[in-house]
Image (tube, rainbow, N blue to C red):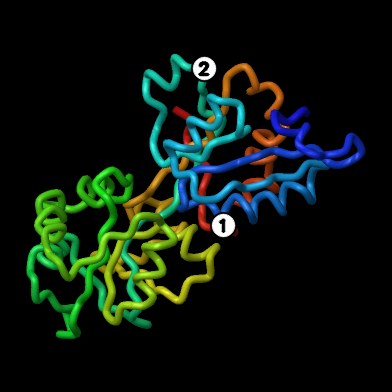
């Protein structure tokens, strides 16, 4: 397999290189998966951080990345540009807090926490929100999953005391620093970055892979591995690894499950 950027100071005798980038949710995930893949194949994965979905997709089209990890499905325009989805995986999406054992929340009560300026946790402890930009997938997910959240998030956005985190890593950093914080996040990011943040049970259900798999916990974020269709044959080795027993075990250990490819 020949990498697009394999000519970058990589000697012929060295292992092949796959360059990957995309949504911040998956940065640590892909770095760790790269280690597992290198153990199975004579191939190395280099993760380029801080690109985001849009930037990584553009980089694949321009031939500067081999694979983009997208937080959303491809648009018709991106498909027309020659992009295809190689594989997809999903991870539980929910709310995290700096509180060590945060009280659980009911689905129907979450809206109020984003609307009330003096919102507290169910036990009365002061609650501090962290928001994401309007364009972020996590904002859309929260709006789609929980009743009234689109309007509630916009209400919270107008408050001067509510910070807006530009990236997934900024989001987790702020959540760690704020006492009583509440913000959206994925299991794979928090697990792979070993963040001292705790997930909140929703309607008494924990956001675990097991509960996601059985349907008991219905809130998930899907990640899409995107590449140029003209290069899909070159990337079959990585695709095959993800679909193998070893690859599936590697995904589960990192907080994600294989998902149907669109």
**Image point 25% across, 60% down: which residue?**
131
Q: Where is 20 relative to 230, above or below?
A: below
How far is mark 2 from mark 1, CA to CA? 27 Å
Q: Earlier in the sequence, mark 2 or mark 1?
A: 1
Quarter holding the N terminus? top right
Q: Residues within 10 Å of mark 1 (few under 14, many from 20)?
A: many
The answer to which image quadrant residue 124 occupies is: bottom left
Q: Is 208 placed left or right of 239 in the picture?
A: left
Give the x, y percent position of residue 40: 79, 46
Read off the residue under disc 2. 82
Read off the residue under disc 1. 28
Give the x, y percent position of residue 129: 23, 68
Q: Residues within 10 Å of mark 2 (few under 14, many from 20)?
A: some
**Image point 9% across, 57% down: which residue?**
155
Quarter holding the C terminus? top left
How many numbered marks have been drawn onto this rendered protein structure? 2
State the SS at label 2.
loop
Q: Where is 3 relative to 82, above or below?
A: below
Which label number is shown at residue 106? Answer: none
State the SS at label 1.
helix
**Image point 42% across, 43% down: which residue?**
222
């Amino acid at each position: 397999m020949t990498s697009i950027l394999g000519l970058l100071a990589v000697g012929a005798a060295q292992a092949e290189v796959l360059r990957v980038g995309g949504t911040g949710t998956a940065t640590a995930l892909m770095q760790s998966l790269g280690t597992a893949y290198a153990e199975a194949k004579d191939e190395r994965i280099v993760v380029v951080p801080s690109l985001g979905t849009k930037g990584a997709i553009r980089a694949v089209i321009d031939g500067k990345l081999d694979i983009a990890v997208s937080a959303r499905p491809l648009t018709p325009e991106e498909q027309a540009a020659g992009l295809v989805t190689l594989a997809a995986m999903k991870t539980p999406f929910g709310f995290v807090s700096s509180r060590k054992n945060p009280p659980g929340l009911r689905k129907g009560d979450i809206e109020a926490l984003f609307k009330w300026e003096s919102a507290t946790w169910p036990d009365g402890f002061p609650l501090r929100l962290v928001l994401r930009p309007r364009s972020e997938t996590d904002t859309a997910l929260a709006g789609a999953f929980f009743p009234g959240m689109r309007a509630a998030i916009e209400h919270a956005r107008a408050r001067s005391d509510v910070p807006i985190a530009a990236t997934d890593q900024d989001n987790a950093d702020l959540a760690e620093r704020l006492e009583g914080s509440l913000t959206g996040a994925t299991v794979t990011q928090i697990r792979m970055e070993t963040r001292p943040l705790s997930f909140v049970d929703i309607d008494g259900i924990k956001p675990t892979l097991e509960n996601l798999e059985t349907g008991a916990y219905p809130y998930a974020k899907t990640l899409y591995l995107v590449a140029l269709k003209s290069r899909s044959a070159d990337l079959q080795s990585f695709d095959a690894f993800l679909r193998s027993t070893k690859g599936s075990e590697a995904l589960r250990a990192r907080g994600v499950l294989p998902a149907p490819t669109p």
